[in-house]
Amino acid sequence: KDIKSEEQGQKLLKDLESEKSRLKEKLSQLEEERNLLQSKTQSLDERQRQQILALEKKVNEARETQREYYEKELVKLQARLEGEAAQLKEAHSKTLEELAWKHHTAIEAAHSNANKDKKKLQMELEQQFEKEKLHLEDDKNQLRQQLENLKEELTTKLTSANQEVCRLQDLVRKSEQGLGTAEGHISSLQEAQEILQKELELTRARLRETTDSLYSVEGELDQERQQHEAMIAAMREEEKFKVDRMARDLEIKWTENLRQECNKLREELRLQHEEDKKAAMTQLLQLKEREKNAARDGWQKKVEDLLDQISLLKQNLEMQLSQSQSSLQQLQAQFSQERQRLTQEIQELEEEHQQRHKSLQEAHILAFQNMEETKEQEQKELEERLQQKHSEELQALKETHKQAMEGFKLEMEQELQTLRFELEDEGKAMLASLRSELNHQHAAAIDQLRHNHQQELVAAKMELERSIELGRRQEKEFLCRISDLQDELRHRDHHIAELDKEILHLHENISALTKELEFKGKEVLRIRSESNQQIRMHEQDLSKKHEKELDVLTADHIREKQSMLADFNKTQELLKEINSALQISLEEMEEKYKNRESRPEDLQLISELKDLIAERDQLIKKLIEDKKFYQLELVNRETNYNKMFNASPNVGVINPLVKQKKKNDKSTNRFVSVPNLSALESSGVVGNGHPNRLDPIPNSPIHDIEFNSSKPLPQPMPPKEPKTFLR
């Protein structure tokens, strides 16, 4: 039993020792694996730390770029707001200048229209005066012609009466005997003389009537002159009334235009302000979305790049581990040193980053405060300048308008006075000249009538009747003209009253326009102050929104950073699993590729290539046989040179039929690998053209006497029969 127990104890000891050795081996293996895993974990930790550092650097850079971008956007928005304010001010000033210029142009147009109307009236009055003058001159010429006609008729009647007197005297002389008849004739003559005296009295009465009619015509002319002067005065009053009415209409129109333009400007400013607000909000939202999308895309790209880098680094590390394990210990020491150094650098960089962030915030706050102060000062200065400019421009416009109206009134009054005096002087001069001419003509006509009335008694009856008819016609014409002139006077009076009403209306419009301009100036100042307040409120809202957005972005950035790190760790684990699976699949694919079966296409291609090689080998063999045949043929024909060739054969050449070149021959050699008999054409004929050759070989078709030397020989074929040269 003791022996068995000892044996069992020895066996147990041996088993325990074997287990101990096996466990020691396992421990050594596990230690090696642990060391490898530690080295791998250390390398992975260092890589992760490096990647984290790189990511932190990139995040800091992205944060700085975002901050710079936001600052630039703020500067751009401020510059744009300033530019829009300047543009609005410029547009307002331009509109005021345009309105002033339009008002000035309207006043000038009214002046020009009034001058044109005045000139038109002057021309019409002058034309009427010239027409009346021409009409009176025509009447005067007609009277002169009538008097001349009367004179001619009276002279003809006097001559006829003298002839009758002479005839009667002859009759008296001839008929002295017939006294009774003479007495009867004398009595008849006395009766005729009495009749003529009665007719003379009638003609004198008619002449008196004509003189009375002439005096009445002169009175009518005076009345017409007075009416003409009254018409001129009425026309002047009408012109004044028209000018005043035009001024009032222009003032009303310009007030309405100014109101409409001011309302349009208000609506445009309100719409622009709303559009600017909407555009700023949309731009900020778009910027946020773009930045978020860009950050996401950037982080995704960075993750992909990092994954690619991790895969590459894994491959490199595997290669390095397979190459040398001794360098790992050195690398571990270096990595530990670098880790310490990097941790110190990270701490320093974090401190610097915090300090920079604080300094940037302080600088941003100071810059924003300075910008607000400068903006407020500039806005105040601009408001004061614009108020001064607006008040000065309004005063200048009022003064210029008053001066222009006063000057226009004075010019119109002076022109009307000058026209009145000129027309009165011209009318007086014309009437005086007409009176003097008519008086002179009347006196001359009366003298002529007094001198010739005794001889013109017979013709005076007809002339008086004609003059009476003419007088009646002239009276009718004068009555028609008087009625027409009275109608024109009534129309002119009505027109003058309308012009006076228009002038009063224009004055009222001018006063209303001035009041409205003052009211609009006040409204413009009020709108400007409201717009400035709205701009300030908008800037404050934007600054608050920007601060809130910065806070939100920083919080989002921290959250995204944490989520990215978690995703990165997850992706790293997934990539490790994927890498191991890919390696396994790659090994399987390599084994499959090595043990793959050949494709039918490849087998077919190999068979085709083999067939081609066999065909080429056969061709090469055939060519070698042909070469041997031609060489043997040449050797066999060397004894028959005297039969085939010249006396000087070309020995040692493959084609012995080629003729050697002479010294003076410039023709090119023809090297042919086959015997060519065309060279014999030049050498076979000598002397008188007879062939210098031997007799041909019997039963040879080549060496026929009727050989056509112009055609070359064909290429030789390999012999299947006894070898001969074929043509």
Image: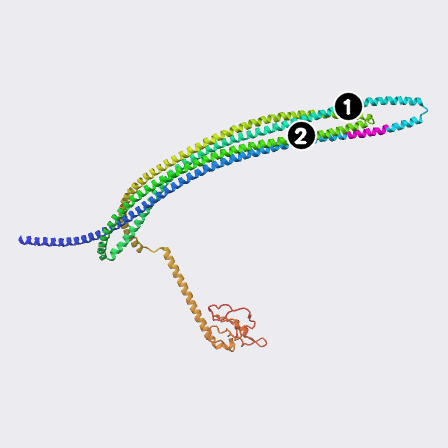
Q: Earlier in the sequence, mark 1 or mark 2?
A: 1
Label 2 is placed on what type of residue?
Answer: Lys
x and y percent of residue 636 in the render? Answer: 46, 75
Left or right relative to 580: residue 103:
right
| Residue 154 included in the magenta stretch of the image | yes
Which residue is denoted by mark 2 in the rendering? 428
Can residue 472 be seen in the rendering of this structure?
no
In the rendered image of this protein, does residue 342 appear above or below residue 247?
below
Secondary structure of the residue carrying numbered label 1: helix
The label number, if any, that marks residue 148 in the structure image:
none
Residue at 40% x, 40% y is: 82
Span of residues in magenta: 146-161
Marks 1 and 2, how far apart at CA: 31 Å
Which residue is denoted by mark 1 in the rendering? 206
Label 1 is placed on what type of residue?
Answer: Arg
From the image, state whether disc 1 or disc 2 is nearer to you. 2
In the rendered image of this protein, does residue 646 appear above or below residue 403?
below
Depth check: give the residue in front, 613 or 91: 91
Q: Residue furthest left?
A: 2
Q: Mark 2 Cα within 10 Å, few/some/many (few <14, many 20+)?
A: some
x and y percent of residue 703 in the render? Answer: 53, 73
Can residue 202 be seen in the rendering of this structure?
yes
Left or right relative to 28: residue 432:
right
In the rendered image of this protein, does residue 506 appear above or below residue 45?
above
Depth check: give the residue in front, 665 or 189: 189
Q: Are marks 1 and 2 in contact (CB under 8 Å)?
A: no
Depth check: give the residue in front, 104 or 207: 207
x and y percent of residue 63 in the render? Answer: 31, 45
Residue at 61% x, 33% y is: 119
